[in-house]
Image: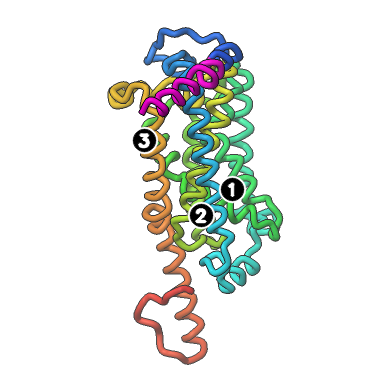
Amino acid sequence: MSLTRAVLGFLETEIVNPAAKFVERIAFEMPSVTDLADTYKGTWYLSPRQHTIEFVCYNVLFFVLFRIGLHLFRKKGSAFYSPRLDQLSESIITNVLAGHVMDKAVLVLLCGSYALTVYHKVFGDNFMYLLQPCHVNVLLLIFTMVAPKESKMSSMAFNSYLHYLWATIFALSFPDTTENGLYLVIENFWIEHYLLLLVPIYLIYTGRFVVFPLSFSYAVLSYAAFSLFHSFVLSGFGLLTGHNLNYMLVPPNSPLMHSLGKYYRLSIYCVTFLCCLVSRYVIVEVFSIGLRIKQWKKANSIMREQGIPEVTKEIKVE
């Protein structure tokens, strides 16, 4: 017991305390008193010491989870190496610039909404908030739609995004419609978030992308990538600039969040994992029903042409 105490004391004195002082020195000059009604400005709601420990621990944890998920994703024999999945991927034109006019219209709406967002953030003097997950997700969708057909990254990015639909639903349920005096700020908020919700449904239904089989390992990979973005990028830039990017410095103005105190980020990370599972295992599966019905009708149509009796049960797509 004394040895453990001695080791912990050494780590605290020689590593943690100097690291915390370094973080406090390089961080933006933030006040110690927190106004929970103003969730845009960062404060030392969490101490420099806690920021230091959590920055190291969370980033190591999420990086390990990402590597594990990626390893299982690449493992031969997994559902992702199914020949059927490869055939489906090869038969789809993922680059919408070579696709239907509706695909191009959807892309124009996404690009237009993001351009408006850039205008609002830059001229509203809060350009750091372009790092907010919803704005980054718009870029993610744009990338998936314009990436070359042979790019496997576009399919991976799209299927990862399917785990993040909960964030858009949450934003629409609890909208932050703060007015900054610029043109179409509120309107673009609604346009952006409805696009984030409806465009994936459109892409699923039209079969523009192959939806990967349900996979817990891929859910872990997607969750780890989402969490790394928060724990490394948003936390890091938040400390350096004093902006409370997606509540990494100060919790939302909610009695529940306030009751969690200094453990609010741990609670958010845990709940986020459950939300990612619900998004992919429940929400996306419900959205995919339309595609399954479409495939079923197509199979029946082909069989009628061949003189084969209609299928009365839903077919199983391999």
Horizontal and vertical percent position of residue 293: 42, 69
In this view, the residue in front, 38 or 30, is 30
Which quadrant of the structure image shows residue 165? top left
Q: Residue furthest bottom?
A: 307
Q: Magenta stretch containing residue 11, yes or no?
A: yes
The answer, for residue 176, to whether it is visible in the render is: yes
In this view, the residue in front, 231 or 12, is 12
The range drawn in magenta is 1-20
In this view, the residue in front, 30 or 207, is 30
Identify the mark nearer the N-term, 3 or 2.
3
- The quadrant of the picture occupied by the N terminus is top left
10 Å crowding of disc 1: few (<14), some (14-19), many (20+): some
Vertical order, 91 against 95 (above or below): below
In percent of the image, x 45 and y 80: which residue is there?
300
Report the Cα–Cα distance between label 3 and label 2.
21 Å
Which quadrant of the structure image shows residue 15? top right
Question: Can you identify the residue that label 3 sits on?
Answer: 173
Question: Can you identify the residue that label 2 sits on?
Answer: 202
Identify the mark nearer the N-term, 1 or 2.
1
Tell me if label 1 and label 2 are in contact, CB under 8 Å: yes
Instruction: Name the element at disc 2.
Output: helix
Residue 106: assigned label: 1
Three-letter amino acid code at the position of disc 3: Ser
The answer, for residue 188, to whether it is visible in the render is: no
Identify the mark nearer the N-term, 1 or 3.
1
Q: Main secondary structure of the magenta part?
A: helix
Instruction: Name the element at disc 3.
Output: helix
Report the Cα–Cα distance between label 1 and label 2.
9 Å
Three-letter amino acid code at the position of disc 2: Tyr
Asked whether, in this view, residue 313 is left or right of residue 317, the answer is left
Residue mark closest to the camera, 3 vs 2: 3
Residue 145: assigned label: none
